[in-house]
């Protein structure tokens, strides 16, 4: 659970001691956590990022111990805690991965793919994070682009897409969520209508952002391709009579 939430085990135990996190289900010496705990941890992380103190978060939780937890009160826990990606992971044997990339499978390329998070190791198998990215990478390599160049481009794309994601989430954080969180921490929770509006806005962020990025990328590709064609034409030798 700590690894999934991106925190240390010590922090997880601290949150439990501070009553920020519900107790796990116990079976003997085993503690079972579920998606509700993970969503709560991500909500706490989101509140901390917005400047709220652990004391303020604890007070907010205590104030609503009548069955409505912080995430439900704010209408954000499900939206923040949900996994938004619709990518399909692919399980591969090392031999199957070689079928995709042939002699491009080098120690350096594997290390880069692991560092990017494209590949993880699960026992004797490898897991690629995305069927679409795997197929795209394989096609680019098939068309003559070296895998190391594909991975370098992927890292650059990651930088830009992270910046785009921050841009869109910042808009929601600043103009939709911030006031509600501040008022809730001060003991003035949002009403049902505002809560529903916040939840709907956060849930719609992904398709809205993807639509904008897709449109802008399509237009940018058109501009770049036209510019490349113009450059190629200028480099061609003039034909007689032209």
Image: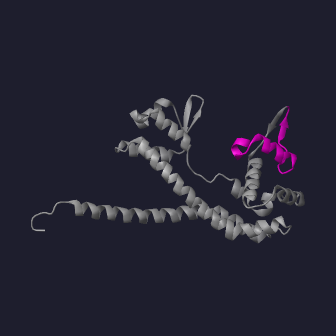
| Residue located 48% across and 49% down the image | 154
The magenta stretch spans residue 241: no
Q: Tell me where residue 59 sits by quadrant.
A: bottom right
Residue 184 image-quadrant placement:
bottom right
* Image spot of residue 5 (x, y percent): 71, 46
> Is residue 89 among what the camera can see?
no
Looking at the image, which residue sits at the far top?
Answer: 124
Residue 210 in the image, given as x and y percentages of width and height: 54, 61
Asked if residue 85 lies left or right of residue 190, the reply is left
Magenta region: which residues? 1-28
How far across and how far down the image is residue 136, in percent?
44, 47
Residue 110 visible to an observer of this rendering: yes
> Is 140 located above or below residue 48 in the figure?
above
Is 96 positioned to the left or the right of 76 in the image?
left
Q: Kindly identify the residue that appears in the image at 77 percent across and 40 percent down.
A: 9
The quadrant holding residue 147 is top left
Q: Verify whether residue 14 appears in magenta.
A: yes
Q: How is the image coloured?
A: one colour
């Amino acid at each position: 659970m700590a690894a999934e939430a991106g925190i240390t085990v010590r922090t997880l135990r601290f949150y439990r001691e501070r009553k920020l996190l519900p107790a796990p289900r116990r079976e003997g010496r085993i503690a079972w956590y579920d998606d509700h705990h993970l969503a709560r941890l991500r909500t706490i992380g989101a509140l901390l990022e917005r400047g709220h103190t652990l004391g303020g978060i604890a007070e907010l939780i205590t104030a609503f111990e009548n069955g409505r937890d912080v995430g439900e009160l704010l209408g954000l826990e499900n939206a923040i805690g949900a996994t938004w990606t619709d990518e399909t992971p692919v399980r591969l044997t090392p031999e199957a991965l070689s079928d995709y990339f042939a002699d491009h499978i080098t120690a350096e390329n594997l290390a880069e793919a692991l560092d990017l998070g494209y590949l993880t190791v699960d026992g004797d198998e490898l897991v690629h994070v995305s069927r679409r990215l795997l197929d795209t990478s394989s096609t680019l390599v098939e068309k003559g682009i070296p895998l190391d160049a594909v991975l370098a481009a992927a890292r650059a794309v990651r930088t830009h897409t992270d910046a785009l994601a921050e841009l869109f989430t910042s808009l929601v954080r600043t103009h939709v969520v911030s006031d509600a969180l501040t008022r809730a921490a001060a003991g003035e929770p949002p009403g049902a209508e505002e809560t529903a509006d916040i939840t709907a806005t956060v849930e719609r962020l992904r398709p809205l952002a993807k639509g904008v990025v897709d449109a802008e990328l399509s237009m940018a590709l058109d501009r770049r391709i036209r510019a490349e064609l113009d450059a190629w034409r200028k480099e061609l030798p003039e034909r007689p009579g032209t």
